[in-house]
Image (cartoon, grey):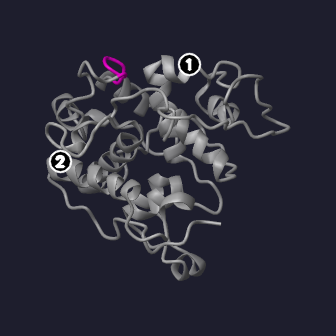
Amino acid sequence: MWFWLLSLFSLLSLLGATPMLIPSGGGGGGGDISSVISRDLFEQLLKHRNDAVCEGKGFYSYDAFVSAAKSFGAFGNTGDAVTRKREVAAFLAQTSHETTGGWPTAPDGPYAWGYCFVQEQGNPVDYCVPDQEWPCVPGKNNYNYGPAGRAIGVDLLNNPNAVAADQIISFKTALWFWMTPQSPKPSCHDVITGRWTPSDADKSAGRVPGYGVITNIINGGIECDKGSNLEADDRVGFYKRYCDIMGIGYGNNLDCSNQRPFA
């Protein structure tokens, strides 16, 4: 689970990744994501996020999403119309899994309840990993907040609570992770837009282009190369729902059940 999107950095620390910094623009041409996903479509995809039972009620707004995406020009602005929609669907699916409030018999199904939570549920892990350049602030779980904050122009290392308090910062931190390669991993953006070519080592490990590699990037050590499992299947469920609503195909290789995690 992310912290909502704090958990993106939580996963980075768990997997020992050292992301490469990219400019806040993220490359690409600066298009407006509203041309790919309208306000009405956003509401349809995340239809229960503002229900009274959701901790995140009122937090995840369409305007904040659009505003944050403008800082990453290539997001939802790479490739043809289908590819652009598929990237938005994949991003919302992965983040929806991490913030879901759904359950098997939930109204409209379990995949209509993305973005229900803001804080990590259960027993949060101490994600502080000692680092000379980015030392953890005492009492804060903030590994990777230093590089993430520097990339988006916010001092998250000393003020990690800003991610759960400011909706634009929350979206920006998630998009920063999405757009940033973590050697030997590609970026999620490059995978979903077809800009990633697997190496021979990737191919021998079963890592081939498709949505499943994104799950591998995010949480491969826990969810991949283990056959079907509820966590990975949930990510695929969200993705299929969003693609169906957006009227696009899923692409190939949706799961990572037979993929070895990245080293």
Q: Is residue 88 left or right of residue 70?
A: left
Q: Is residue 174 magenta?
A: no
- As drawn, the label of residue 42 is none
Please identify the dominant SS of the magenta region.
loop
Q: Which residues are magenta?
A: 55-60
Foreground of the two, 161 or 243: 161
User: Few, some or many C-alpha atoms within 10 Å of disc 2 (few <14, some 14-19, many ≥20)?
Assistant: some
Q: Is residue 195 left or right of residue 23?
A: left
* Residue 238 seen by the camera: yes
Foreground of the two, 39 or 244: 244
Q: Is residue 225 above or below residue 192?
A: below
Q: Is residue 104 left or right of residue 1?
A: left
- As drawn, the label of residue 162 is 1
User: Few, some or many C-alpha atoms within 10 Å of disc 1 (few <14, some 14-19, many ≥20)?
Assistant: some
The residue pinned by badge 2 equals 246
Amino acid type at mark 2: Met
Residue 261 horizontal/vertical position (percent)? 56, 66
Foreground of the two, 19 or 70: 19
Residue 53 horizontal/vertical position (percent)? 28, 22
Q: Say which of marks 2 and 1 sits in front.
A: 1
Q: Residue at x 39, y 36 (%)?
A: 99
Quadrant for the C terminus in the image: bottom right
